[in-house]
Each structure stands twice: as C-alpha cells, then as structure tokens.
Image (spheres, grey):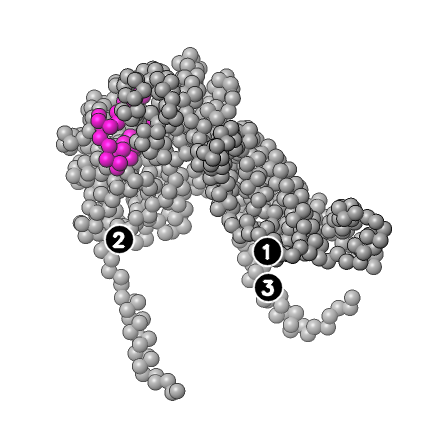
Amino acid sequence: MKLQLQPVVAAVLATVAVLAAPQAYAQKAEVIHWWTSGGEAAAIKEFASAYTKGGGTWIDTPIAGGGGAQARTVMANRTMGGDPPTAAQYNYGRQYEEIIKEGLLNNLDDVAAKGNWDKLLPEKIKNAVKVDGHYYAVPVNLHNENWVWYNKAVLEKAGAKEPTTLDEMFAAMDKIKAAGGGVVPLALGGQGWQEGITFRGVLLATGGLDLYNKTFKDKDTSGPGFRKAVETFKKLKGYVDPGSPGRDWNLATGMVIEGKAGFQMMGDWAKGEFINANKVAGKDFGCFMAGGPKMPYAIGGDVFVFPKSKNKDSEVAQKKLAEMMISPAMQVAFNNKKGSIPIRTDVDTSKMDVCAQAGVQAIKEGRLLSSDNELLSPDAKGAFEDVVSKFWNSDMSVDDALKSMTVALKR
Amino acid sequence: MARSKRPRRLHLALHVALLPLAIIALLGYVGSVLWSIRISFSSSRLFPRTDWVGFTQYERLFETERWIVSLNHLGILALVYILGVLVLGTLMAVFIDQQVRAESWFRTIFLYPYAMSFVVTGLIWQWLFNPGLGLQSAFRQMGWTSFTLDWTVRPDMVLYAIGLAMIWQGSGTTMAILLAALRGVDEEQWKAARLDGVPKPRYYLSIVLPQLSPAYATAFVLLAVALVRTFDVVFVMTSGGPGDASEVPAKFIIDHLFGRNNIGLASAASVVMLSTVFAVLAPLLYWRSRVQARLAAGH
C-alpha cells in the first residue's frame, strides 16, 4: 500500500499546531492543603467555588495527614525542586520561618496595602504573618486548640452537670464512668500531636497565661505549677479507652458525635465535624475552653503562603487568591464550615454559634497569646511532644518526664 | 581457566554498554551517600547549609532518647524477625521438599504474603490487632469473652506484633531461596541415609541444612537489609506508638528529615545506620568470599 505523503504531512503539522497553541487556562491555581476530613473539605470547597465563580481554575491538592507534616514536606520539596504550587497551607508560627529566609515566597505587600491589613488584623496575628516588615502569608482563620467538646445527651443520661472548667469535667467524667454502658468518658486519638494538645489544655487550666508563657516562652519548667499540670495530665489516662493509640482526631470526634464518648479535648476544627453531621451547638453538643471562660486564645490557625514561581501567571492568581480568602464574605462562609473564627472583627457575628462567639469576644478583648507553634521551633515542639506522648503511654515517672521535657524545650 | 579469546571490539562494546548503569550508580547512589555524610557534619535544618559543625549532630543524636530507643527496638526486631523467618522459611521449604501432592498450591500460598507491600501487610495486621475492630472483638462477640489480643496498644507487646506481621510477610521469599537450594541437594544422600537408618528430621538437621549455608547467608543478608529499612510496616501499623514503643531508626530518620525540619540530624542518623549495616555485613561477606576462595583452591 503506497503511503500518501501529503495527507500524512498535513496531519502531523495539524497535531503540532494544536499542541503548540498556548493552553488558555483561566488563572490556574494549584493549592496544597491537608484538610481531608468531612468538615474541613466542606470548608475549603467554599474557597474553591468562590475562586471558580470569579473566573479562575482551582486545582485541589489535598495531602492527608493530620497536623500537616506530609503536606508541608511536599510543599518544601516541590518548591526546592522548581515545581511549586500556587498556594500552600501552613499554620501560624515558625513553620515557614526557614522558607522565608531562603527567599522562596512572594510577599503580599500590595494586596495588604489594598486591603489595609495593618489596620484590619489584630496585633498578634499581624506579627505572625508579617516578617521583616513584609507580609508573607494571608491569614484565613483563627483556631483555638484548647476547647473541650461534649455530647449533651451522654452527660444527661449519666446525670452529670455540664462543666465549664477542667475540674468540673473530671466530676462529669466520673459520672459517665460510673454509668457504664460502654460509653468512653474521654475520646482521645492516641497520636503525638493530639496528646500534645491535651497536655497544653491541662497546662492552661492549671496555671493560665502565666504558666503557659513561663513554659514555652521562658522555657522554664521548674516550679510547682508545671509539675501539677503534668500530674493532672496523667490522671486523664484513666478516662480514655484502650483502643485510643493511633486513632485519628476526627474518628475520636465521631465517637462524641455518635454518643459513644462523652468528651473530647480538641481544637475547634472538631466543631466543623459536628456541623458537618448537622449537630447544633448548645442543643446537641456543648463546648467550653479548657482554661475557663476568661482563658486567653492561643493563636492557632491557618495561613496560605505563595511560593515564587517562574510562571508569571501564577503571581496574578496568587493575588486573586489572597484577596478572595480575606474578603469579609469568604471569611464568614469559610469559617462557619470550618469551625474557626474569622480574623476580621468587622464581620457579622450574629449568625455564628455560641462557641464561635466566645472566640470573637476573646479577640475583641485582646485575649490572644502566642502559641507554642510560634515560640518553639518545629524540632523543639516535636521533641517536647515526644516526651508528652511517651509519658502518657508508658509508666515514666513524673520526675523523669520533667527532666526530659526541660531538655526538649531547649532544642 | 584460559582467557576467553573475545575480540577487543566486543570487550569495548560490553564496557560501553555498562557505562550508563555505572554512571547512575556512582552519581545517584554513591553520590547521595557522600552528600548525606557531608550534610551530617553541617547545621542544616529544613534546607541544606554548607557550614561545618564537626560531630555536633552526632552528639545531639545520641542524647536523643527516641533514637536510643529506636536502636534497641531494631535489635529486638533483628532477633525476632530474622530468627523467625529463617526458622519458618526452613520449615516451609522442608515441608514442600517432601514432594507433597499439591506442591504448587502450597508454594503459591506460602509466597502470597510477599506479593503484598509492607503497607498492606501493616494495615491488615493493624486491623487484626485492633481491640475494637479486630480478632479480639470478633472472638468476644462469638462468646469467648476473655480473649485478648491487643498487642498493638500495649507498649510492651507492640514490637512483637510488628515482628509477627513482618515474619508473615517475609517467610515466603526465604522459603523460595531455601527450596531452590534444597532442590540442588543430591537425592542419593537420602537413600544412603535411609540405609543407615537415619530418621528424616535428623537427616535434614545434620546432613542437608549445613549444605545450605550459602543459601542461608543470602537469606540472612536480604533479611538484614529489609530489617534496617523497616519503616512502612511500622508507620502503617502503629506510627511508632503507643508513645515510642515501636519506634525504629528508619522512621526516626524520616520524621526528622521532613516533619521536624532537621535534615542535619536525620543525615547523622542515616550515617550511623549505614555504618551499622557495614559492620554487620562486611565480615559476613568477607567470610563468604574466603570460603569461596578455599573451595575454588581445593579443586
């Protein structure tokens, strides 16, 4: 069969022409994050749909792993390797300290000037995202990790009074334990970071702002307050079920939602799970801050950073993303699904539930404190949580734990 | 043995063909090892730095309790895993060597676990051991209420749970290696032994297995390497928990490389692991080469 040359050449040229034509994606934005639970996914969908409605293309790149270590790893590797995402999620604190130092992030000074971030953001939050006078991250929410959530029906059935402090919680858990029936008083996911959150909640309940700062800012663990916190922390072990090691945080929240457990000490991203399960705050579940109603809000939460890229289009997409994320409408929509509170105080708070309103009150009263994420390097924080986890899971003595914790803090 | 009279062109062609592999091996493999060693002498955190800090990272490493604990665990796992696999592999190989009827079925069944990655193995055994979801809860629901199998949540037993999962996964390949070597053993020996009235177990133990020492050496090397690399099964089964009761060096290294933003410390740990492996395997390989040389000279 003789091959006709002309049609073949024409076909080849046509193919090449199609491939060579620039792909006209409307502002592509690839976003790396670690929001993979039900409530979290619903929240980031708000951002995605708003961005898409504004004419952009949102490429979602979730990387599972509570705490986000895997996601931050991928982000660092890809940025170093020359294929950075358009945006990446981080937590407030020193996690992104080094990538800023290496000059790998675009700064957001023009978006900040346009949105008047200097006036808009509370002081502590501004200090967390403004490094060396430049804005490097857009804050999207404010989480408090030291909440306690409880299932109202479970408490009622056990005849327990709804607690507002940690001491009252112990009394309620005793009632639940006595009532039996397979209900676990305290649902804990046995992972290092969750045990860490539990410990910091106990620390705030024991000695408040002063003890917290003494421990994480001054790295000073001497003194009776810290010791008492460590002992109280171990007391909680008696209320946790044996299947706890390794459990994911949202499965522990699920236990409380389904009435299989009474309490969970977790950040207010757990509230997102309750909301996703159509539970109502104040009716189905209750909340209180571990350190009591006047407890300072430890700044936790999420920001998005924008790595430098060779692609000029990405800068436009990045600015669009930042503006969209901090807009008042998006702040309310996103945070309602997420369980956190907006970082702007100029939004309508009437639609927020009781737990969120307590948080907004804390911001208005300026009761914010720098979290351990900001005060400790990831290495020191990790080492400290190693000791907390080991102390929780083994029969390590309180004295040994104190010694190891002191060493860990100084890293 | 006379030198083969291959034409020189062919010799050159052979060497050129192997060049890409050699380059990749040198650059990729040896190069990264050298780079890791270099980084372990720096103060690198999230990104590499080019300073020199002497042995600081190594000092810090051995002051880190979690690292010492992980080394202890590696030692325990070495005993449990390597011994367990060698014994189980031997038993399975000898069993199949009996020329049983459904030999190929048994071979397939014994080898199946190896087809699963360590991740799947870890998940399966994690579910089996979970007190709320696994064997314990199943037996209790069936009526046996005092049955306990919660090794993965007990700090004192979790390492053995992991060892069990690894033995299950790894016995198949050792069995295959030993079976291949067994098939090379002369059938006449069994006839001679039967004439002398030697019972079968004694025959295997005293006559056959000693002849398999090259196969055992191979199996041991493969097992030792797999052991030092143990990360995925631990990560999936227990995440090193409860606490650090099932921490292993590979997981310590990965955690510090990524989550803890400390590649200097992780590189120091990697160099320690490398030295340990060398220290164990080098004498073994040297001994094997001496035995080979003796055998070759004896002919």
Sequence-earlier tag: 3 or 1: 3
Q: Position of residue A268 (x, y in %)?
A: 29, 30
Q: Position of residue B161 (x, y in %)?
A: 55, 36
Q: SS class of the residue under badge 3?
A: helix
| Disc 1 residue type (three-letter) | Trp
* In the image, farthest residue toward the top: A224
Residue identifier under label 3: B18
| Disc 2 residue type (three-letter) | Lys
Q: Are marks 1 and 2 on the same chain?
A: no
Residue at 66% from the left image edge and 53% from the top image edge? B96
Residue at 34% from the left image edge and 15% from the top image edge? A171
* In the image, farthest residue toward the front: B143
Question: Residue B5 occupies which quadrant of the picture?
Answer: bottom right
Query: Which contiguous range is marked in magenta?
Result: A263-292
Q: Position of residue A12 (x, y in %)?
A: 33, 75
| Disc 3 residue type (three-letter) | Leu
